[in-house]
Amino acid sequence: MGHNLMLLKNGYEFTLKAITAIPLFFICSTVLADSVGCDDAYVQLDTAVLVINVEPTGVDDTDNIQCALDAAIATNIPTVRLGKHTYNISNLLVENFKGTFEGASISSTTIQVIDRSVDCAAFVFSNTYSSAIKFSNGEPRIRYMTILADDPCVDSEFIFSLLMFTGRPATNTVCGNDVIFGVVDRIKLVELATDRVTRPIAVFTDSLVLGDGCINNLLGTFKLNRSEIIARRGILLGMKSGAQVDINFNKFSMRNGLAVEIVDANQSTTIFSNEFKFVKDKLDGIAFSLISVTARTENAMTPAFNRVVIHKNKFDVSEALRGEIIRVRSDYLPKKITTLITDNTLLVGAEPEGLDLLFVHASGKGVSKGLVSGNALGEIRAGIRLEGSVGWTIVENSGFANTSSPPDIELGVATSACIVGPGQNATVDDFGAGNFIL
């Protein structure tokens, strides 16, 4: 004979079948599993460790994973866990999740976005960005899995992102608490052959129309750690209000450059100890930028300040014919971008005739007080070009090719108060005023 025991934990009621012949201490030592209101055949709560486990169906797992995440939000369960399987989804929309969404490991847990399963046009109709997995507000931590996509949109258009972190939706005019604290840790994102993914990761305000919704208030932090992105492009960043972003110890294999793109941000960004590789694909010889930081002057809502530190990264552009490794641009003085580029290593190829490859290209009066120091440039033929920039310092770099055309360092018209240090074995053309060539 047995009877039912009703347990209450964190405001959530669980039912336990107890056997009267077994002492209570034995019951308490076992794993207690129960329903969270999803499909019990695939979604179960492990009450001993407060983890919602999701098993694959073999077909479309979207509803089960969405239900598990929603249940975790409703009941304050801290973890939703996928097993050592492949899961198929269309798109997940998760709001105010404060927990961990994880797999078993990068190699054993895979989320496959089903081809032509996401209604991307519906996102656009609602003035929001299309995404396979979108987290709004909250403190989501995503780890230990691989996410794959080929042709996600129903209408075979481009999906904006595979994984997006944002604040309040564009339709919400109350912008208070427009905050996201996101972490991506040890995951792999792969865009397959059709090139239908605009960006694997986006940390951006969720509004397609300037002036609509909460477009200038996205506060918080974001961290991308020990992950890998294999795609045309990498991550788009545009946080506001002095947010902190860390991009550390990752590997980027890019077919179209733009591994890290920062647009109209007011954030402090650290890009540290990553490996960037430009991979020659069907777009042979394309011009690209692996790291791009811009403030668009036509956007009146563009914040006034952005700071970027690019330190101890490895850039492999041995397959590239032309492009810019680091691109910084702000043409309007009130929109300031400060950039520190230090101790990076550059690997270049055989450099055929006509190669046009820049390590740093900075332009605009708003690009001020930059530092380029201690970088090993691998005998690059065209190194650093400043146009209209103010107050840059270029010191203690090595590996310039020491050619006169193009020059290793070019200070363009309207540059001023820039300093080029001695002992760099670099040719310098100075077309500005008030610069110091030492």
Image (cartoon, rainbow, N blue to C red):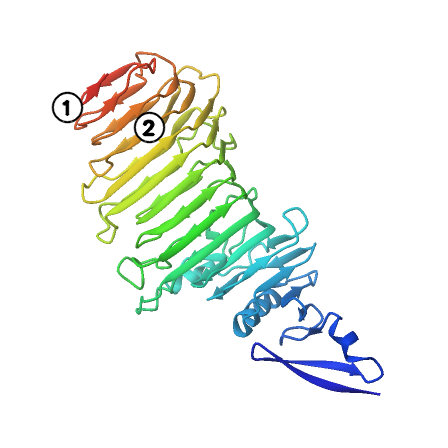
Which of the pair 29/212 is nearer the observer? 29
Q: Residues within 10 Å of mark 1 (few under 14, many from 20)?
A: some
Q: Is residue 427 above or below residue 148?
A: above
- Secondary element under disc 2, as helix, strand or loop, is strand
Q: Is residue 362 above or below residue 93?
A: above
270 left or right, relative to 68: left
114 left or right, relative to 237: right
Q: Amino acid at mark 2?
A: Val
Residue drawn at x 48%, y 30% is: 314
Residue drawn at x 40%, y 48% is: 245
- Secondary element under disc 1, as helix, strand or loop, is loop
Residue drawn at x 38%, y 50% is: 244
What residue is shown with label 2?
Answer: 372
Q: Residue 285: give x, y in percent of width and height.
A: 44, 27
Inter-mark Cα distance, 2 to 1: 19 Å
Residue 29 image-quadrant placement: bottom right
Q: Residue 179: give x, y in percent of width and height.
A: 38, 61
Quadrant the C terminus occupies: top left
Residue 315: image tag: none
Q: Earlier in the sequence, mark 2 or mark 1?
A: 2
What residue is shown with label 1?
Answer: 434
Residue 398 image-quadrant placement: top left
Q: Residue furthest left?
A: 433
- Can I make out residue 286 in this image? yes
Quadrant the N terminus occupies: bottom right
Which of the pair 302/13 is nearer the observer? 13
Q: Amino acid at mark 1?
A: Gly
